[in-house]
Amino acid sequence: MTVSAERTSPAAPPEGRPRDPFIAAMAVVATGVTVVATDGETGRFAQTVSAMCSVSADPRLVLVCINGRSPINEAIKTNGSFTVNVLGSRHDHVADTFAGRPWPGKDPWDFSCGEWEQAPSGSPRIRDAVASFDCSIHQVVEAGTHRIYIGLVTDIESHGGEPLIYSAQTYAKPIPVPPSVFDDYPGSGPTYRKNTKENAK
């Protein structure tokens, strides 16, 4: 699939300052957008995170990377649990709020920007998220500037919808693209799509 851009932010580095090639290359990688949230003794915290992926289906494990400077780290450590909320294309304001870029009239990290409910662990989850994973801490790894949290998924909610994508400092949404066609190879194309069509008959 490809992506359709919806809104952009300035991408150029300050004048005279060369852009780090690693950061520049990673900026064009398309990622899903999630909000990691926790609640407990230390209070309620949430942080927008683009570095999230599945680790294992058995046991059910997901991974998120959070900058070590974020105050949510101590909260997750104390609470022992967190949710990973996969945002939809309608949640761009939620993503900005918990990235510290609130829209006019809102404060940074303001939970009034979305509809929240309590997951079984006690952590907040977005009521209409594309998907939401309630997790207990399975493992924490210190890596450079970030902490890698591997969460053991204890509860799942899935509502579907268009996931929010982020690339080159632009929000986007997925758009399906037709398979490539090569005239020299009749019938070429991904077999999984053919099998899906045949199985649907």
Image (cartoon, rainbow, N blue to C red):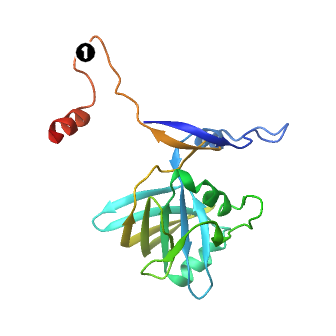
Residue 168 visible in rendering: no
* Placement of 24 over or under 107, stated as above or below: above
Looking at the picture, how far across and down is residue 21, in whole percent?
66, 38
In terms of secondary structure, where does tag 1 sit? loop
| Residue at x 54%, y 54% (from the top left corner) | 33
Q: Quadrant of residue 19?
A: top right
Viewer-proximal residue, 133 or 145? 133
Query: What is the residue that sits farthest to the top in this orientation?
Result: 184
Q: Quadrant of residue 144?
A: bottom right
In which quadrant of the rendered image does the N terminus lie? top left
| Residue at x 61%, y 42% (from the top left corner) | 27
- How would you rate the neighbour count of disc 1 (Cα within 10 Å): few for under 14, some for 14-19, many for 20 or more? few
Query: What is the residue that sits farthest to the right in this orientation?
Result: 16
Task: Give the residue number, with chain letter if any, for mark 1.
Answer: 185
Looking at the picture, how far across and down is residue 53, in whole percent?
44, 56
* Circle 1: residue type: Tyr
| Residue at x 51%, y 57% (from the top left corner) | 87
Residue 100 visible in rendering: yes
In which quadrant of the rendered image does the C terminus lie? top left
Q: Quadrant of residue 154?
A: bottom left
* Placement of 127 over or under 93, stated as above or below: below
* Placement of 200 over or under 93, stated as above or below: above
Looking at the picture, how far across and down is residue 172, in whole percent?
56, 43
Viewer-proximal residue, 166 or 152? 166
| Residue at x 19%, y 36% (from the top left corner) | 195
Q: How many marks?
A: 1
* Placement of 163 over or under 112, stated as above or below: above
Looking at the picture, how far across and down is residue 69, in whole percent?
68, 68
